[in-house]
Amino acid sequence: MRSITTLDLQYAHRFYGFKGEAQYLHGHTGKLTIEVEDSIESGVNLVFPCNEIQKTAWEVLKNFDHALILREDDPLLPAILKVYEEQGIKNGAPTNKMKGSAFKTDLATAYPDCRLVVTKETMTVEGMIKIVYDLLKDKLNIAKLTFTSGVNAATQEYEPAKTIDRCPLCGIALNENGVCPKCGYKK
């Protein structure tokens, strides 16, 4: 069985090295759909509560929301960092309250304090799916990811292979100590 949830993201980026309008910095709204596969937890009759999928995903993905996403070799990156430094926001502004945890993977690095994500490749819908899967594959039993942005869309299916211990009372994942972070159930 599958649980499905959707997250909306707003971000700015450009397709460095492309011709035409795509080479300019522009804003986008994207929609990420995450499908998680698992067995039904008999205590709550749920595969995995959608609001818990959103919470798990959002902890990492909020770094992409209202953020600038640039490829690491984009010549705009040093210029933007210089402007951030001149404005005193390179290390974050006090009003920036919606920060995820910083991360560094082979595909992307998040600088949540200055709302910046630097990627290894051009930020296409396919590229976003690769990055999201890499960030969430150990947290959720992902069966399918779909990302749409404007008229562009991509989908990737995966073979779910994880077994996640879940609470029989509320269906969410138990922490590393076998305790439910929501209701306190202990395995």
Image (cartoon, rainbow, N blue to C red):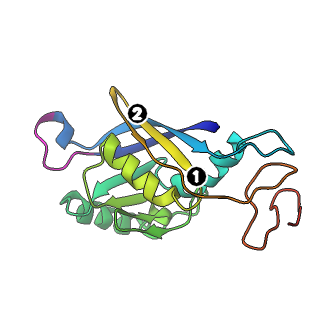
Q: Main secondary structure of the magenta part?
A: loop
161 to 176, vertically: above or below? above
Q: Characterize the local packing of mark 1: few (<14), some (14-19) or many (20 or more) Cα atoms within 10 angstroms.
A: many
Q: Which mark is residue 148?
A: 2
What residue do we see at 59% from left, 44% from top? 36
Q: Which mark is residue 55?
A: none
Secondary structure beneath dot 2 equals: strand
174 to 61, vertically: above or below? below
The tag earlier along the polypeptide, 2 or 1, is 1
Quadrant where the image shows the N terminus? top right
- 88 with respect to 6 (left or right): left
Give the percent coordinates (x, y) of residue 71: 26, 57
Q: Label 1: which residue? A: 141
Find the residue positioned furthest to the bottom: 177
Quadrant where the image shows the C terminus? bottom right
Part of the protein shown in magenta: 14-20
The kind of residue on which mark 1 rests is Asn
- 172 with respect to 91 (left or right): right
What residue do we see at 85% from left, 52% from top? 168
98 to 157, vertically: above or below? below
